[in-house]
Image (cartoon, helix red, strand yellow):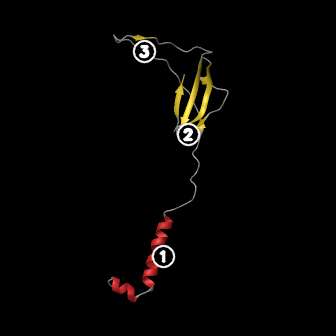
Amino acid sequence: MKISALNLRRCPVLPGMLAFLLAGSILAGCDKKETDPETELPLETVLSDNGFLSADGEKVGARSFTAGDQAGVFLLRDGQAVAENIPLTYDGQSWTSEKTVKVNGEEICFVY
């Protein structure tokens, strides 16, 4: 059966069904179900100092970290600070912090 404007007038149930199906398909696209929260993991830090290259290409200023050296961390996520001035201390093998910082991989990290 070919559907036309004339046929729709003869079958009053069909326009109602079409409206119902259209509304149902629109509402099906609007799901209010919350997504699972992003998994956050502890921040692991590895720092190195490779120095700088001088104008003639010579590497200068490189140094090794020694036990007791400190650095600070500042993290931004979506333009908002999620961690500020987190002190890190080098124990001779790794960097540690007394404060646990959780990250999900979308942060921008600044170390100073």
Alpha-carbon span between mark 3 and mark 1: 68 Å
Q: Secondary structure at mark 1?
A: helix
Q: Amino acid at mark 3?
A: Phe
Residue in the picture at 58% in, 13% down: 66
Q: Sort mark 2 into few (<14), some (14-19) or many (20+) by Cα contacts within 10 Å.
A: few
Q: Nearer the viewer, residue 93 or 107?
A: 107
Q: Amino acid at mark 1?
A: Phe
- The mark nearer the N terminus, 1 or 2, is 1
Residue 108 x %, y %: 51, 33
Residue located beneath label 1 in the image: 20
Residue at the far bottom: name it.
10
User: Which numbered circle lies on residue 104?
Assistant: 2
Residue 13, given in percent of the width and then of the height, sits at 45, 85
Examine the image and state in which quarter residue 43 appears.
top right
Among the two numbered marks 3 and 1 on one chain, the one whose residue lies closer to the N terminus: 1
In terms of depth relative to the viewer, which is nearer, 93 or 54? Answer: 54
* Residue at the image position 52 percent from the left and 22 percent from the top: 47
Of the residues under marks 3 and 2, which one precedes in the sequence?
3
* Labels 3 & 1 near each other (Cβ < 8 A): no
- Position of the C terminus, as image quadrant, is top right
| Element on which disc 3 rests | strand
Cα distance between the residues tagged 1 and 2: 42 Å
Give the labeled residue for mark 3.
Answer: 52
Residue type, label 2: Asn
Q: Is residue 14 above or below residue 28?
A: below
Q: Nearer the viewer, residue 45 or 32?
A: 32
Say which residue appears at 46% left-offset and 69% top-offset: 25
Q: Residue 1 is drawn in which quadrant?
A: bottom left
